[in-house]
Amino acid sequence: MATESPSQETAHEVARSVLRKNLSVKPGETVTIEAWPHTLPWAVALARETRRLKATPLLLYEDEASYWDSVEAGESKVVGAAAAHEFAALSKTDVYIHMWGPGDRVRLHTLPPKDQENLFGFNPKWYQVAQKAGVRGARLELGRPYASLARAYSFDADTWTNDLIAATLVDPSTLSKAAAPIAQALSRGKQLRITHSNGTDLTLGLAGRPPRVYAARPVVGDPKRRFDMLTSLPAGALRVALDERVADGTIAANRTCYYDNGIATGATFEFSRGRLTEAHFDSGEEFFEKPYEKGGAGRDRPGFFSIGLNPKLHNTPQVEDIEAGAVMTSVGGNGNLGGKNRSPFFGWSIVAGATVEIDGRELPLPG
């Protein structure tokens, strides 16, 4: 196990919250739960709570050691194949709960790109089948903490898990209430300005694009948000695609950038006339620079703006952007939020405790 197993009381509290508040599981529904060795205590609690709701659970279990044995044997295509019997179950599923696996994401990222592609070859068809079936569900970040990744982040795995537990338990209605006035202001505004005493002073443009609220409930039936049929938990963010032509000034991070297999600190972006002119870091610049080299057209244009809403996080790995009051500016693609930037590149800088103004009026931020 990568972390200490949660107590039964804690596991069941999380399961009750997820199934009732986030996913609104009803009697008679079918609930499919993914499990790996490091997430099995959570999966067992979810299955038990599903039955308490008079719904029917199905547990899909993958063994970490067996997985890596197959990968090392050159069977990545077999591992990532679209399994007909699994998809048959998916087509009859009402609610799906995903917990990140395999656990050793650092090892995963050392594999050749072709092997990584093969291992997740099932993914496009999975979403097709799930969308057709009207599946709703959740991706639980509680599956992320793992010994190798915690070491790569220099972050205590049990502290990480405890942060995620507290943040997952935040009521969705609390997040929706915090998001409402911010969403209204972003919908009507033309210009953003972010300032902080650490040297941040950045002006960005809004283009009348509707902001999206991520408030811990799945979105089903919207073709523009098909990946949001699974809500990420913990949640709590509001994001809007920026005007790709407008960006002047500097944003200096005071939060870590947690990549899938390492970290970058001190991410400072400088913009002029709508383009990124310089990006420098205190450490970990390679995680930005290598993908940036392959980013193509649009990699240096503003992508999207995000404000975190979750009050139970503080620079927590992989959810650093949803900490209440954390402000993120990205460069690269924003097409998934209704923007025009199609670059495959995504880079970001996050500053917490900043002042945000929309058209000269200060925006009250959570946290």
Image (tube, rainbow, N blue to C red):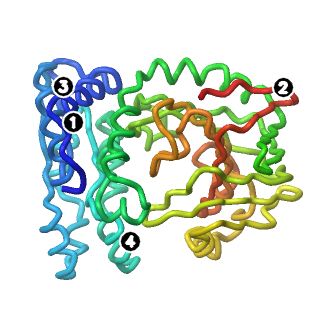
State the mark number for residue 93.
Answer: 1
Residue 359 at what x, y percent from top left? 86, 30
Q: CA distance from mark 2 to mark 1?
A: 47 Å
Quarter of the image containing the C terminus? top right
Pair 2/3: label in front? 2
Residue under circle 3?
A: 29
Q: CA distance from mark 4 to mark 2?
A: 44 Å
Q: CA distance from mark 4 to mark 3?
A: 36 Å
Tag 3 or tag 1, which sits nearer the N-term?
Answer: 3
Residue under circle 2?
A: 361
Q: Verify CB contact (< 8 Å) between mark 4 and mark 2.
A: no
Front residue of 342 and 110: 110
Residue 194 at what x, y percent from top left? 78, 41
Height in image: 108 above or below 138? below
Q: Verify CB contact (< 8 Å) between mark 4 and mark 3.
A: no
Q: Residue at the location (27% across, 59% down)?
A: 103
Number of residues whose C-alpha sits closer than 10 Å to that of mark 4, classed few (under 14), some (14–19) or many (20 or more): few
Specify the amino acid type for callout 1.
Answer: Thr
Residue under circle 4?
A: 109
Specify the amino acid type for callout 4.
Answer: His
Badge 3 marks a residue whose secondary structure is loop
Badge 4 marks a residue whose secondary structure is loop
Pair 4/3: label in front? 4
Specify the amino acid type for callout 3.
Answer: Glu
Pair 1/4: label in front? 4
Tag 1 or tag 2, which sits nearer the N-term?
Answer: 1
Badge 1 marks a residue whose secondary structure is loop
Tag 3 or tag 4, which sits nearer the N-term?
Answer: 3
Tag 2 or tag 4, which sits nearer the N-term?
Answer: 4
Q: Residue at the location (33% across, 35% down)?
A: 165
25 horizontally vs 349: left or right: left
